[in-house]
Amino acid sequence: MSRLYRYRLPPWCRTCLFVFEKALLPILVFQCIRTIFFPTTFDVFLLGIIVGVFLAFRYKWI
């Protein structure tokens, strides 16, 4: 479903979605390293959200 949904979006929105999808992995790695060295509740919560969004993009749920 997500493949058909992506092509129904306006071109500028689709471009933003693709850019966000490609930039998510470096952000995930940075946040994981930050959480390992400086673990706070907010960092763990943020890492969980980023992992969830990354998996959603990976399995084409978004």
Image (cartoon, rainbow, N blue to C red):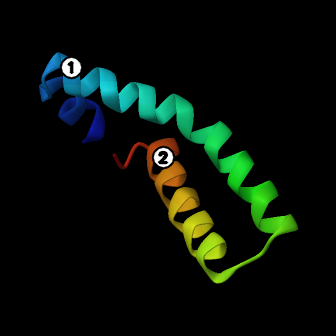
> Of tags 2 and 1, which is closer to the observer?
1
Image position of 59 (left or right of 12): right
As drawn, 7 above or below 26: above
As drawn, 8 above or below 47: above
Outermost residue toward the right?
37
Write down the residue under mark 1: 12
Q: Nearer the viewer, residue 37 or 54?
A: 37
Q: Nearer the viewer, residue 35 or 5?
A: 35
Kind of residue at badge 1: Trp
- Residue at x 77%, y 75% (from the top left corner): 39
Image coords of residue 35 (percent x, y): 76, 66
- Residue at x 54%, y 57% (from the top left corner): 50
Q: Secondary structure at mark 1?
A: helix
| Spatial separation of the CA atoms under disc 2 and disc 1 | 23 Å
- Residue at x 62%, y 44% (from the top left corner): 27
Image position of 19 (left or right of 38): left
Marked residue nearer the N-terminal end (2 or 1)? 1
Question: Residue 24 appears in which quarter of the rendering?
Answer: top right
**Disc on res. 53:** none
Image position of 30 (left or right of 9): right
Kind of residue at badge 2: Tyr
Write down the residue under mark 2: 59
As drawn, 59 above or below 10: below
Q: Secondary structure at mark 2?
A: loop
Tell me if label 2 and label 1 are in contact, CB under 8 Å. Answer: no
Image coords of residue 17 (percent x, y): 34, 32
Query: Where is the N terminus found, in terms of image quarters?
Result: top left
